[in-house]
Amino acid sequence: MSPASSCRCGRAESLPGAPQGGSGEQYFLGNFDGKRFTVSAEPGSHGWTNYGKDDYCAISFNGLPKGEKPILIGWMSNWQYASKLPTSPWRGQMSLPRRLSLLRDDAGLALVQSPVVAPLRVDHSNLSTTKDGNRSANMQEAPFELNLQFGRPSQQVFGVRIYIDEQHWTEIGFDQPNREFYMDRTRSGAAVTPDFPARTTAPLIASRSYDLKLVVDRSSIEAYAQNGTIAMTDLIFPASQSSRIAIFSASGKAVSVKGDRWKLRSIWR
């Protein structure tokens, strides 16, 4: 059984239906005999490759060494506002490449996506602990990577906020009562168009781990949750490249979490 992504490129007006509005992409798992592809009926054998607003028309790399897992890279934008992004002299970017694998557990099948980011790590630190038991970190300058393990939390809604200032932040969290993983960029910075401010969501599987990997760049956040079975990519346009990380819960009570942070070097030489 192998992952096969279905990608149709087109404008949102002619190709609506992504879970967050505008353009998106799905995957289908099954068997290919060289002539015919048969879709699996097992739970989780098809779904959305990415639950954010900004990952579309992903393609895999050719020429990988024999035995290597497939690697996927996507277009990081959405046809709802691609021509209006406040960037210059370039407009648009690609996602991180993501290594693909399959997970089979009590919940069924899942496509696992692991960003290829380790070669860019240059500086490691742990999140500090404040007096009230919550974790926070001093101002961080993008790009950076954040890995968090929440264990089995008792809090109903919890996660991380990436603050630019007290009026602007992006919230990434787990909502257990509604069984949702989400990213809220409605306060992240420039709104771009009416379609841009959004709270993007993905189904949360209660039996899977509550871990979170974030790759924060100057104008994007790529989130991977529950062992990479959830991928969510959203553009942001904050007023500053520096941000403060804070762990939160909706109740205000402390959340047990272990965390690692890496500064990431530029890919440009």
Image (cartoon, rainbow, N blue to C red):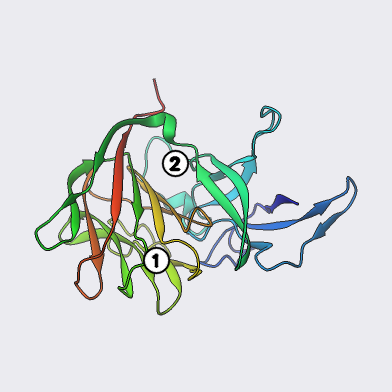
Comparing labels 1 and 2, the label whose residue is closer to the camera: 1
Examine the image and state in which quarter residue 188 appears: bottom left
Q: Residues within 10 Å of mark 2 (few under 14, many from 20)?
A: few
Q: Tell me the element at label 1.
A: loop
Quarter of the image where the C terminus is located: top left
Query: Residue flagged by tag 2: what amino acid is it?
Result: Arg
Q: Which mark is residue 155?
A: none
Give x and y (percent) for residue 227: 49, 54
Query: Vertical placement of 112 versus 185: above or below?
Result: above
Question: Residue placed farthest to the left in the image?
Answer: 131
Alpha carbon distance from label 1 to label 2 = 20 Å
Residue drawn at point x = 17 percent, y = 62 percent: 167
Using the image as rendered, state which of residue 232 and residue 239 is in the foreground. Answer: 232
Q: Which residue is mark 2?
A: 91
Q: Which residue is mark 1?
A: 198
Give x and y (percent) for residue 193: 39, 61
Give x and y (percent) for residue 117: 44, 36
Query: Residue flagged by tag 1: what amino acid is it?
Result: Ala
Q: Residues within 10 Å of mark 1 (few under 14, many from 20)?
A: some
Using the image as rendered, state which of residue 237 and residue 73 is in the foreground. Answer: 73
Question: Residue placed farthest to the right in the image?
Answer: 35
Give x and y (percent) for residue 7: 67, 52
| Residue 133 horizontal side relative to residue 36, left or right | left
Residue drawn at point x = 19 percent, y = 71 percent: 253
Reading the chain from its start, which is encountered first: label 1 or label 2? 2
| Residue 71 horizontal side relative to residue 226, left or right | right
